Image (spheres, helix red, strand yellow):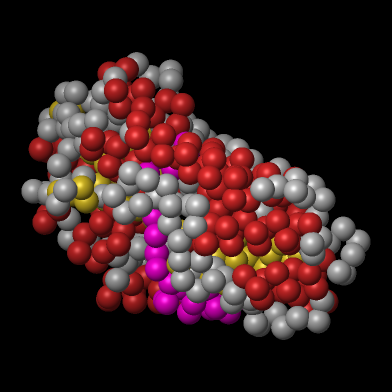
Amino acid sequence: MRSTGYRRTVAALSVCSLALAASACGSGDDTASGKTRITVNCMPPKSAKVDRRFFEQDIASFEKQNPDIDVVAHDAFPCQDPKTFDAKLAGGQMEDVFYTYFTDAKHVVDVNQAADLTPYVKELKSYGTLQQQLRDIYTVDGKIYGIPRTGYSMGLIYNKKLFAKAGLDPEQPPATWEELRADAKRIAALGDGTVGYADYSAQNQGGWHFTAELYSQGGDVVSADGKKATIDTPEGRAVLRNLHDMRWTDDSMGSKQLLVINDVQQMMGSGKLGMYLSAPDNIPILVKEKGGDYKDLALAPMPGGKGTLIGGDGYMVNKKASPDQVRAGLKWLDHMFLRPGAGFLGDYARAKKADAPVGLPEPRLFTGAADTKDQQVKKANANVPVENYQAFLDGNQSLTMKIEPPNAQQIYSVLDGAVSAVLTKKDADIDQLLKDASGKIDGILARS
């Protein structure tokens, strides 16, 4: 799943508008007035005024530098709509350069809708500077089919003000689930509707967080060959047992359950929640939309110390694209997203002037000198308390980064049932819940 948001302040955006004619998505004819014409998506909508302006500015500067290329951008909400994505793939209606989640890569290749970029990436100067684990996501059977744009990893957002009020050290967030449980109990004891720890348990989000928590314990959702569920394990039981005991024994998770991301963000923004799992891009939303304060919001690595869930997005190229369109698309991606300290996501000075938050620890796309440059520019323009995120940066260095499982949304729907059960039923049978969920997941994997 996507963590929360598009770039810095709004949710991820845009597939080809339904109002566009089918032929307007994949361009078909790759020339327009002697230029190579490419269609691209994930353009911010007009309602996201700042992001829209930046996107248009960057396209204009790209076309000025590349007068032989014409970029036609499409916007809608969201960037990828699960309800239309597969239909567009099957109908051959994707843009020439189209947005995907990390979890889409293999599927798009399997249905033969992605161009093989392997012969072209040598022309993309920035490709070798990108994190290998992100590049690997778009590599299928040794061939390159996409370019990563952003990446996120899950961590623990916590309220420093509530930590201090509960007699806890705000500079020492919990490193284990046992410590988190103890801290949550102390925070909930403050009373007045204060909740120590909150978690999602509906709309597939409970399954998403179960996966993240299982990774943090060193477990996996499916086997390495992708054929069998691996949740009915000591690690899987530990996840559900911990949630059950925090809810019913400690009373540290509050009485209201079946929460989704907006509910939990509202609780944190209002100062009534001590901790919840999230990625760094939640923090601007908590401040801009939910009433939080940057100085009170800190970020720690996933408790457990073994692993964390990573996600993100990137772009793939339509199989119908001509060689000239492939080259033009890669040039556009390089200009928009792959320049350290510049471009749509990396022009930190421009973002700061627009009062967008600068200094969050992610996304971190580059390695080596490119990463050093990007971080230097970010630090020079930081307008948020970067010291609040240092624990997250330090702790992530020792964690195993693991992508979401195959058939993620279907699996998350199954796992929602197990998570919601332990949070709403005091007598929930954890062993039976895991057994039943495993059978359903095995069925999903067998059909895929």
- Residue at point 75%, 48% (across, down): 427
Q: Which residue lies furthest to the right in this view?
A: 192
For residue 385: magenta?
A: yes
For residue 322: magenta?
A: no
- Residue at point 34%, 24% (across, down): 88
- Residue 369 visible within the image: yes
Q: Is residue 115 left or right of residue 393?
A: left
Q: Quadrant of residue 186?
A: bottom right
Question: Residue 225: image x %, image y %?
Answer: 29, 49
Q: Is residue 160 left or right of residue 89?
A: right
Q: Is 375 or 153 nearer to us in this picture?
A: 153
The vertical placement of 57 against 92, above or below, is below
Question: Residue 183: image x %, image y %?
Answer: 73, 73
- Point out the stretch of residues depicted in magenta: 383-412
Q: In this view, does 265 lie to the left or right of 40?
A: right
- Residue at point 38%, 19% (across, down): 20
The vertical placement of 135 against 294, above or below, is above
- Residue 25 visible within the image: no
- Residue at point 37%, 38% (across, down): 445
Question: Residue 179: image x %, image y %?
Answer: 66, 76
Q: Is 166 or 180 nearer to us in this picture?
A: 180
Q: Is residue 341 left or right of residue 92?
A: right
